[in-house]
C-alpha cells in the first residue's frame, strides 16, 4: 500500500509595486528564495531545491512530475506542494512570513492573509468511476498534428507519470476515459504555442484536487477538480 501523500495548498494575498505577476515569475522568485535561504535545511532532510525547477546543475531539464506548482489570480498567489514539495512550501511560508523579505524581479512583495491547508492523499481504486474536470489542459503543442484523436491515451500518460513518479502502484486495472472536451484559445509558452482544453473525464482512481496534469502544471495548467 502506498503511504499517504501530503498535498499542501498555500493561498496568500500580495501587494507591491508590480501588478499582474505571472505564475512563471512567482516560480522563479520562489526557487531563488529557497536556494538562497533554505537549501541547507532542506538538504538535511534529503530534499534538494531542484524539485522546484526540475533542472540539474548543468541546467538540463529533469523529466519528472513537478512537486511544487504555482498559480496567480486577483492579487493572490497559490502554491501547491506535493510529497517532498510539501516540506519545501511549508518551510518557505514559515520563513518568508517571519523575515518579510520576498522579492520578485528585485521588487519587494508584501504577503498578507496566508491560508494554508494540507490534505493527505491515500491513492486507491474506487468501486465506481468518479468524474473530474481539468481546466486549461495542455496535452500537446500547436506543431503536433493528429494528437486530438489520441487524447484519451495522452490523458492516461499524464496520470501515469504522476503514479510512477510518486511510487504509486495498483493491484487492479485503472480505468480512465474522457467524457467531454472543450477547446480553448491556444496558450503561449516559452518559444512554443500549446493547444489548450477544458475537459471532463472519469476514472476509478481517487485523485486529489489542486494538482495539475499535462504540460506546464508547475505554472497552473491542467488543474484537476472533483465533480462527483
Image (cartoon, grey):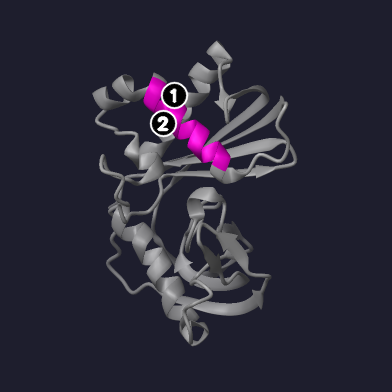
Q: Position of residue 184 (x, y in %)?
A: 68, 71
Name the residue that disc number 2 marks: 88
* Magenta region includes residue 35: yes
Q: Pointer 2 and pointer 1: residues touching (CB < 8 Å)?
A: yes
Q: Is residue 75 left or right of residue 169?
A: right
Q: Is residue 73 above or below residue 49?
A: below
Q: Residue at x 64, y 26 (%)?
A: 114
Residue 203 in view, yes or no: yes
* Magenta region includes residue 202: no
| Mark 2 residue crowding within 10 angstroms, few (<14) / some (14–19) / many (20+) | many
Residue 75's quadrant in the figure? top right
Q: How many marks?
A: 2
Q: Overall secondary structure of the magenta stretch? A: helix
Q: Residue at x 55, y 67 (%)?
A: 193
| Mark 1 residue crowding within 10 angstroms, few (<14) / some (14–19) / many (20+) | some
Give the residues in magenta: 25-36
Name the residue that disc number 1 marks: 91
Amino acid at each position: 500500500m502506498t503511504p499517504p501523500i501530503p498535498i499542501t495548498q498555500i493561498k496568500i494575498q500580495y501587494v507591491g509595486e508590480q501588478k499582474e505577476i505571472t505564475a512563471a515569475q512567482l516560480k522563479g522568485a520562489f526557487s531563488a528564495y529557497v536556494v538562497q535561504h533554505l537549501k541547507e535545511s532542506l538538504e538535511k532532510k534529503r530534499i534538494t531545491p531542484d524539485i522546484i525547477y526540475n533542472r540539474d546543475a548543468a541546467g538540463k531539464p529533469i523529466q519528472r512530475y513537478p512537486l511544487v506548482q504555482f498559480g496567480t489570480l486577483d492579487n493572490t498567489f497559490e502554491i501547491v506542494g506535493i510529497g517532498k514539495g510539501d516540506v519545501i512550501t511549508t518551510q518557505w511560508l514559515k520563513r518568508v512570513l517571519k523575515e518579510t523579505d520576498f522579492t520578485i524581479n528585485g521588487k519587494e512583495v508584501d504577503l498578507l492573509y496566508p491560508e494554508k491547508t494540507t490534505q493527505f492523499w491515500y491513492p486507491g481504486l474506487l468501486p465506481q468511476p468518479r468524474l473530474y474536470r481539468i481546466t486549461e489542459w495542455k496535452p500537446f503543442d500547436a506543431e503536433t498534428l493528429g494528437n486530438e484523436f489520441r487524447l484519451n491515451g495522452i490523458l492516461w500518460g499524464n496520470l501515469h507519470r504522476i503514479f510512477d513518479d510518486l511510487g504509486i502502484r495498483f493491484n487492479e486495472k485503472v480505468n480512465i476515459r474522457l467524457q467531454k472536451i472543450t477547446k480553448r484559445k491556444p496558450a503561449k509558452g516559452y518559444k512554443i504555442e500549446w493547444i489548450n482544453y477544458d475537459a471532463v473525464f472519469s476514472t476509478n482512481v481517487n485523485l486529489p484536487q489542486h494538482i495539475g496534469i499535462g504540460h506546464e502544471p508547475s505554472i497552473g495548467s491542467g488543474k484537476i477538480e472533483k465533480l462527483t
